[in-house]
Image (cartoon, rainbow, N blue to C red):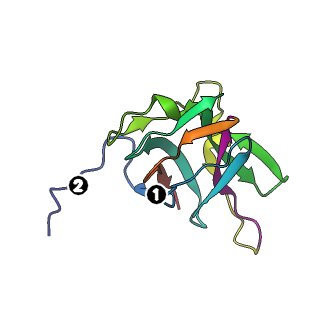
Amino acid sequence: MSYIHYRTKPGRFGVHVVYIASKEINALTSAATDTIRIATPFRKAYVLSCNVQTQVVPVVTTGTSTATLKKAQASDASTKTITSGFDLETLTANKGSPMVIPATVTESDRLLRNTGAVATGDTLFLELVNGTTIATAPTALFFVIGLAILE
C-alpha cells in the first residue's frame, strides 16, 4: 500500500518525526520562574524545532515573560539551553511563532539520549521567567516541540 500523504525528505529516510505539545498554560507566576515539564519519549531523538502559540497574549506591565526550551541531561545532571529566550508578549493571538535555535547550540545539545537503563533518559522542559506584574494571564498557551526519533 502506498502512503502518498507522507513522504520522507532526502536525508531523513528511516527517521520518524513526532510533535509533542506541552500542557495548556493558563497562568504565569509573577516575579518567578515557571518550569513546564515536557513528556519526552525514552528514545534516542533529536530536537528539530519548537514553536509557541496562544489564544490570549500575556501582558506583563513590569518586565517581560521569556520562554526558553532546555534539556536536562541525565549523564552528567547538567542543563543545556536549546532555544533563545522568546518574549511571550510578542505573540499574536491564534498564530504560531517559531522559537529560534541559535547556531551556537551544538548537535550534541539537541540530541536526547538514553542507555536503556533506569534513570538514564534526557528530558525536555520549558523555563518561563516572568516579570514583576502580570496584568493579563495567557489563555491556551501551548508549546510544540518537533523531534526526530532516531532509534
The CA span between labels 1 and 2 is 21 Å
- Which residue is located at x 55 percent, y 48 percent? 46
The type of residue carrying mark 1 is Ala
- Which residue is located at x 61 percent, y 49 percent? 28
Question: In this orientation, which residue lies closer to the viewer: 11 or 104?
Answer: 104
Please give left or right for residue 40 compared with residue 115 in the image: left
* Earlier-in-chain disc, 1 versus 2: 2
Instruction: Measuring from the top left, give residue 77's x and y in whole percent.
Output: 84, 53
- Regarding mark 1 in the picture, which secondary structure is present there? strand
Residue at which label 2 appears: 6
The stretch in magenta equals 119-131
Instruction: Measuring from the top left, give residue 101's x and y in whole percent.
Output: 55, 32
Residue at which label 1 appears: 21
Mark 1 vs mark 2: give the one in front: 1
Instruction: Measuring from the top left, give residue 8's x and y in whole percent.
Output: 30, 49
Instruction: Measuring from the top left, give residue 49's x and y in whole percent.
Output: 47, 41
Please give left or right for residue 66 compared with residue 32 in the image: left
Q: Mark 2, residues whose alpha carbon is within 10 Å: few (<14), some, or many (≥20)?
A: few
**Quadrant in which the N terminus is drawn:** bottom left
* Magenta stretch contains residue 105: no
